[in-house]
């Protein structure tokens, strides 16, 4: 098992990527703490893991509230003895599909401020515990909008750029203490439409070009990726488990390209 004996916290753990990753982490031997704001979904995620023989707990915590996140992380470290992995996949509903001329400044700034805030808050809460043991992995998540020019995703692009820069620089700060930081950059995930805030985002982007979200995503896969497909939740979750494991212990400060070839490094 890749993660046997490890303790992981997944912020946004009841969302599409978060719940998929929690399941894989648990399958690979980790005790998983799923954190979010929707108790029913968190409970279902934890119960599904335990029904498959895994170890999971859940907590309703606002991942933008520094005091609440710190208190939860401290409790996990006290109860389990350590925090080995922290992954932030918190989603922020935001506007896409609106060009600069029609984009309110507040709509541009919302994803930038919110994504930056939650990543700083969660990293601060877990980093000290990891540094004390000179071991740990912090995972963040981005999107190809940080590198792709286009119309209507200025706020998302700036937010993703901020998360990626934060991840690189944090890796430099924490590296001497044995803590790794890796940012995962998947593309749009069709499976997430039904259970994520991205359903509304994709619908808005699709309407701008006269189609619906499934049609927009199909075109994105066929014409915008080298593999002719978009990543799946399984793709992201399995990679997250690998990069969080000791098999990837030489990797830090990296932006993992999971875009199926939408971007070429």
Image (cartoon, rainbow, N blue to C red):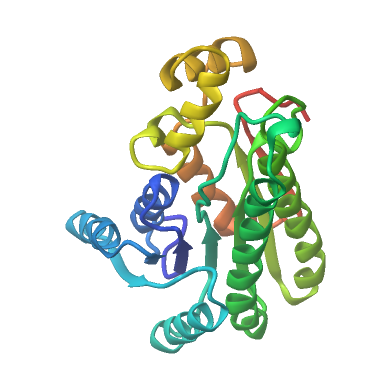
Residue at image point 37% right, 61% down = 29
Of 70 and 31, which appears nearest the observer? 70
Image quarter in which the N terminus is found: bottom left
Residue at image point 64% right, 76% down = 124
Residue at image point 42% right, 19% down = 214
Q: Does residue 230 lie above or below 66 as drawn?
A: above
Residue at image point 51% right, 54% down = 89
Measuring from the top left, give residue 138's x and y in whole percent: 61, 63
Q: Residue furthest bottom?
A: 78
Measuring from the top left, give residue 13's x and y in whole percent: 40, 58
Q: Looking at the rendering, which quadrant does residue 196 occupy?
A: top left
The answer to whether one can see residue 241 in this image is yes
In the drawing, does residue 76 fall left or right of residue 103?
left
Of 251 and 217, which appears nearest the observer? 217
Measuring from the top left, give residue 141's x and y in whole percent: 60, 49
**In this figure, what is the number of numbered marks?**
0
In the drawing, does residue 109 fall left or right of residue 9?
right
Q: Does residue 90 lie above or below 98 as drawn?
A: below
Q: Does residue 76 lie above or below 36 as drawn?
A: below
Image quarter in which the C terminus is found: top right
In the drawing, does residue 26 fall left or right of residue 137?
left
In the drawing, does residue 215 fall left or right of residue 181?
left
The answer to whether one can see residue 251 in this image is no
Of 82 and 185, which appears nearest the observer? 185
């Amino acid at each position: 098992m890749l993660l046997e004996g490890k303790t992981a916290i997944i912020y946004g753990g009841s969302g599409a990527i978060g719940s998929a990753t929690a399941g894989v982490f648990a399958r690979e031997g980790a005790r998983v703490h799923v954190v979010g704001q929707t108790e029913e979904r968190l409970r279902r995620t934890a119960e599904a893991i335990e029904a498959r023989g895994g170890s999971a707990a859940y907590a309703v915590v606002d991942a933008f509230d520094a005091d609440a996140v710190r208190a939860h992380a401290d409790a996990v470290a006290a109860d389990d003895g350590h925090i080995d992995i922290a992954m932030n996949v918190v989603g922020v509903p935001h506007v896409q599909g609106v060009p600069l001329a029609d984009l309110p400044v507040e709509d541009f700034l919302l994803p930038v401020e919110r994504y930056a805030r939650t990543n700083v808050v969660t990293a601060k809460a877990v980093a000290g515990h990891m540094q004390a043991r000179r071991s740990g992995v912090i995972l963040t998540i981005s999107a190809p909008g940080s590198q792709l020019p286009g119309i209507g995703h200025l706020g998302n692009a700036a937010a993703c750029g901020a998360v990626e820069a934060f991840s690189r620089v944090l890796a430099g700060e924490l590296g001497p203490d044995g803590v790794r930081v890796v940012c995962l950059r998947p593309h749009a995930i069709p499976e997430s439409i039904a259970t994520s805030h991205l359903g509304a985002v994709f619908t808005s982007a699709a309407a701008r070009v006269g189609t619906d979200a499934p049609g927009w995503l199909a075109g994105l896969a066929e014409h915008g990726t080298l593999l002719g497909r978009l990543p799946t939740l399984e793709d992201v979750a399995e990679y997250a488990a690998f990069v969080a494991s000791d098999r990837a212990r030489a990797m830090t400060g990296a932006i993992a390209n999971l875009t199926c070839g939408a971007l070429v490094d």
